[in-house]
Image: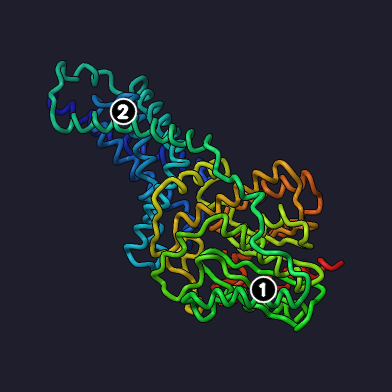
Amino acid sequence: MPTDAPQRRTAWYLPWTLAAGLLFALLALGLAPLLGLNMGGAVPNSAGSVPWPVLFAGVFLCGWLVWWLLMPSWTRVSPLAGAAAGILAATLSYPVVLGFNQMAVSDTPATGGIQWVVWVAGLGLMTTGFAAAMALGLAGGILAWALIAFIRPHDAARNRPSRPVRTLSRRLRRAARVGALILAVGLTGSFVILSLTPVPVQGLSARPSPTAPAQSYEEAFAAFYAVRGAEGELALHKRCSSQLLTHGRKTTIAVVFFHGLTSCPAQGEALARSVFALGYNVYLPRMFGHGEADPDTVSLAALTAEHLVDLANSSTDLAQGLGDNVVVVGLSAGGTIVTWAAQHRSDIRLAVPVSPFLGPYIVPPWANTAATNLLLLLPNMMFWINPLAPVTAPQTDYVFPRPSTHTLAQVMRLGEAVMHDAAREPPAVARISVVLNEADVAVNNQLTDQLVNLWRARDPDVSTERLEFSNHLPHDLINPQEIFGNTDLIYSLLADMIQEAQE
């Protein structure tokens, strides 16, 4: 009978190790929206969203395994060990869940997928990881306390050895508990420091334009060819030079389209033709570091928020000679440029940011400042996957396959500057129409909503057009080659907005 007692206690304990994994998994599902995780359907379909079964299974397995390793029997259960199990489960779940989802949805080479998982998991841990670790750690501590107080067999404590043997496994468990507590303190401390440190946005608001506004169509035309002359010295993709569609004279409206990150002016060619057919001149400028023919180029890493401001100013200056009224439209990072122009250029009639990239979907608004500072501080990384458009059609071979983390940080830095300025003064532009895609898993729409609210507090002429989730539109709403896109819908919407600008 005495020989069977430890076995019975161990067998009775096993369901509670599974219960710990279940508790951690359910808690993770509840925390997902707060932590900025996009919950998809039942099966993996996008690198930007995680199906709830994947999240549940990943956290459950991590939680159960860590709990069992730290507390393999009743005699090892303690609130401190339970808290450590929760912290380690939260930490391990980030790469496990994201890694499984990435393998299920992406055809990217293995090395690129690993880099993407490491980058996203690291960003998540350093920003929202402390909240997940604290929540699961607290839950683990409470569960362990409850097991000791109410459920553990009364004779378990009497069977604990009076002088524990210092085995290797015991030392490893102790090291894991200490490491988990250090990890929790480190994640919390780093988040606090990163959140309280102001993002360096000085000089972006008052940065002077590198050009002067064109006073005539001829000056605008000459300015365009100066741009093309400078681009002629670069090894650009054949479709990626700045483009100008002109009627040979100044029109009532001139439209400027800013392309998205890792793309080039070719992204807006079809849109430009549709707007040109309405009788307007259209200018498609190229963003700094973009459009090079060599896919291995690292030019993207040199882009700064200052480059984006210069592009906003010089393009707006050029457009003054192309139309009586200037309309600026931009997608993603191009939309971020438009938000800056809307805030600071009074010679624009209408600004249309389309899914502006103020921060990634995977980072909630309350952690965006920390994420921006973190990306600015960390060494730059370029990897073989595009976080803003994981899958592209073959016709979009001009898109860079190697985005840069510093480039993302610089676009986010510009977004922080716009938010900072919008909180202090009204936008300079006459009218703003924001287009948001509810199905977008690349940009954080909540940040855009915050910016819109800041603008509306000082200028009521700010409208928002929300594309319903049921449309299941991709992040790139402009390129007609994009899979699952609906450019007929988008082009019609933008055409109506542009035509209203002359009223």
Please, what is the three-letter code of the amino acid marked with disc 2? Ala
Taking the image as shown, residue 454 lies to the left or right of residue 309, namely right
Taking the image as shown, residue 495 lies to the left or right of residue 31, namely right
Residue displayed at 67% across by 49% down: 206
Across and down, in percent, residue 363 comes to 52, 47
Which of the labelled discs sits on residue 223, or is there none?
Answer: 1
Please, what is the three-letter code of the amino acid marked with disc 1? Ala
Q: Is residue 32 visible?
A: no
Residue projecting furthest to the bottom: 248
Q: Which residue is mark 2?
A: 81
Residue displayed at 59% across by 72% down: 485
Dot 1 crowding, Cα within 10 Å, few <14, some 14–19, many 20+: many
Taking the image as shown, residue 156 lies to the left or right of residue 233, namely left
Nearer to us of marks 2 and 1 is 1
Mark 1: which secondary structure? Answer: helix
Question: Where is the C terminus found, in terms of image quarters?
Answer: bottom right
Across and down, in percent, residue 94 comes to 39, 47
Residue nearest the viewer, comparing 136 with 119: 119
29 relative to 101, above or below: above
Across and down, in percent, residue 8 comes to 21, 30
Describe the colour scheme in one phrase: rainbow
Residue displayed at 37% across by 49% down: 95
Dot 2 crowding, Cα within 10 Å, few <14, some 14–19, many 20+: many
Taking the image as shown, residue 159 lies to the left or right of residue 256, namely left
Residue nearest the viewer, comparing 292 with 398: 292
Question: Where is the N terminus found, in terms of image quarters?
Answer: top left
| Image quadrant assignment for residue 489 | bottom right
149 relative to 255, above or below: above
Residue displayed at 76% across by 68% down: 320
Q: Is residue 213 visible?
A: yes
